[in-house]
Amino acid sequence: MTEADRAGDRIERTIEVQGIATHLFEAGPPTAPPLLYLHGTHLGNLWLDHHRLLAQQFHLFAPDIPGFGLSERPDWMHDMSDYVLYFRDLMAALGLERAALVGHSLGGWMAAEIAVWYPERVSRLVLSNAAGLRVKGVPMADIFALSPQRLLETCFENLMAAAPLIPREINTDYFVRLYAERTTLAALAWNPHYDPKLARRLQQLSCPTLIVWGARDRLIPPAYGQEWQRLIPGAQLVMLEGTGHMPMFEVCEQWVAHVSAFLQPSQPQEVKSS
Amino acid sequence: MSRPRLTFHYFHLMPWPDLPPDFDEKYDSAWVTLPNSIYDPEKGHALYNRYFDELERADKLGWDSVCVNEHHQNAYGTMPSPNIMAAVLTQRVKRARIGIIGNALPLHDDPLRVAEEIAMLDVISGGRIISGFVRGTGMEYFSYNINPTLSRERMNEAHDLIIQAWTRPGPFSFEGEHYNYRYVNIWPRPLQKPHPPIWMPGTASLETIDFAAAHRYPYMTVFMPMEQRKRAYELYRRLAEEKYGYEAQPEQLAFCVPIAIAETDDLAMKEGERYMMWLFQKAMKVPTEFFMPPGYMSLRSIRAAIENRASFGFGNTTFKELVEQGVVIAGSPATVIEKLSYYTEVLHAGMLVTGGCTDGMPDYLVLKHQEMMAREVMPYFRQQELPPEPRPVEIHSEQH
């Protein structure tokens, strides 16, 4: 069995954290550096190319954030502090004293908060098209006003890349699940849709940080990528051309190459703005 | 005291009917995002006063109440502050009750203000206020940027606060999850005892029906097909009987139904088609995402809503179909009496909420509708009377 095959051999399991049955994928060599991947809204319970590729080099943990995928959200869990404490306990339950955090969109917001509150647990931080900030005069799209179809059109430059998100059957269950996931997002991000205190707190971060963004992001415009870079000391920014909010779907290999290069401390870093 | 089989409540939305000719093509919503440049304050001045005249006439013609409600940033109803409208009505309407159906409680960060304003209105009007409580439409959670996931909790808590403010001797403290006051001690207190009657209009949420049944508040079905109304009343009755241990009375079941009435069925159909479709096809044009924001409905209710294909608007439904489905009533006085009798005799629902000019109907026609209802329909239902109505019960979802 080659290294790649073994890496592709994912484990799917459920662990109990704060009473929440948390569904997660785990893959990659156990001896490789640990990586906790936090997905964006509606992107739980997926095992796709970017997961597989990351698992070739890292010991990857990809949980479904409570309220998404197969992890339920209890009623008491409705603000960011609940999630930060939950992830602290999830990392402990997974035996991750310290890990690289890679977060996309809503997951990026959560990753940044975890780095603010538990800096000792975060070795390196990657934020891709992350929510969590406000840039005055550059509004994010109102995700709650978008139909499922319009949301896909806003997130994807190439709708073919959205294929893994299209359910086999569009029925009542599908709509109810979508509504439940949107409800989780609304609980966290209806008003305010960002953390008003985060901008100031990010300036205290010392962990190496990479910001990756799709240059055509119409949900969270590229100005937000620039703002993350401006606020986090020493952060690098990679702007990927030809893609928008979903670079790991649309330019997967390129996205993974940037993330991997940044996270592998042993390798020379060759991250360039493209 | 006895009471009639059916009471008549004249409800106005005070819409802005003057939409641009390219509205259908150019705008996907009459709410939230419809540019307010379409509103003309000069015309608005005349329109508001015309609408008030209409309500004043309803009073003189013998309607039991005149009603207003709260909506924001839309062309469907231009009464963002229903209590201001009610204040005007206390000076114009001398006999009928004045219904505010209702104040959208969760939209307000300070529900004590609602308690105060209703108390003021009740005192000013000599105890004629009906106080409806609603959550507001989904659209309003966008317009006011209130988190819809907290809507139900805020509704229940604001309700408890207001009832306590009206009925408990102050000062006392209120300790809620969303609302906290060290000093609840409203001046004035309402005139009616124990407090003004409360109504609960509803569209699709099962929880609202349960809440209304628990408190014995009248539940009002709004613009919905007969099948949906029946399901709502059946649920209310069942909850009343099995969960709360009483038999629901006709005055607990209200129905909001637009009525086109004319000398003949044909004429009523023609007038209805011409003047009512604006409401259903334009004023209620709203994308689903605005109508059902996340968390506004429970998963149980959203499932039921999807399965029943519930929506705010009625899309391409024709007027004839709206009549057949029981969303609206159209016909001669005899036909209207027959249709209303189905509510009173079969469904045992005893409060009709209707009226209100919508699409720029000429005033003489509005007057004709009001008069025909008052002179040819009301008397029929006032001949036979029922025993006195029961009191609401005081229960609160939690002690605060």
Image (cartoon, coloured by chain):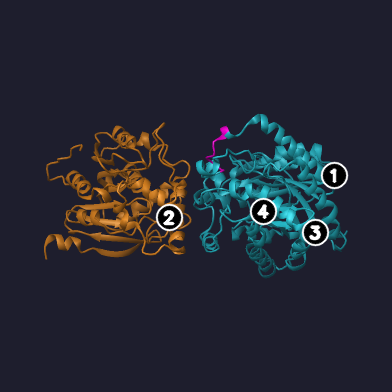
Chain colours: A orange, B cyan
Q: The residue under label 3 is which amino acid type?
A: Leu
Whole-percent x and y of residue A16?
Answer: 36, 62
Q: The residue under label 4 is which amino acid type?
A: Pro
> Whole-Å distance between the Cαs marked 1 and 3?
18 Å
- Which residue is denoted by mark 3 in the rendering? B6
Q: The residue under label 1 is which amino acid type?
A: Lys
Q: Chain of mark 4?
A: B
| Same subunit, tags 1 and 3 | yes
Q: Earlier in the sequence, mark 1 or mark 3?
A: 3
- Which residue is denoted by mark 4 in the rendering? B201
- Which residue is denoted by mark 2 in the rendering? A181
Of circles 3 and 2, the one toward us is 3
Whole-percent x and y of residue B93?
Answer: 81, 41
Q: Chain of mark 2?
A: A
> Whole-Å distance between the Cαs marked 3 and 2?
44 Å
Please, is residue B90 above or below residue B208 in the view?
Answer: above
**Magenta stretch: dominant SS?**
loop
| Same subunit, tags 2 and 1 | no
> Whole-Å distance between the Cαs marked 2 and 4?
28 Å
- Which residue is denoted by mark 1 in the rendering? B60
> Whole-Å distance between the Cαs marked 2 and 1?
52 Å
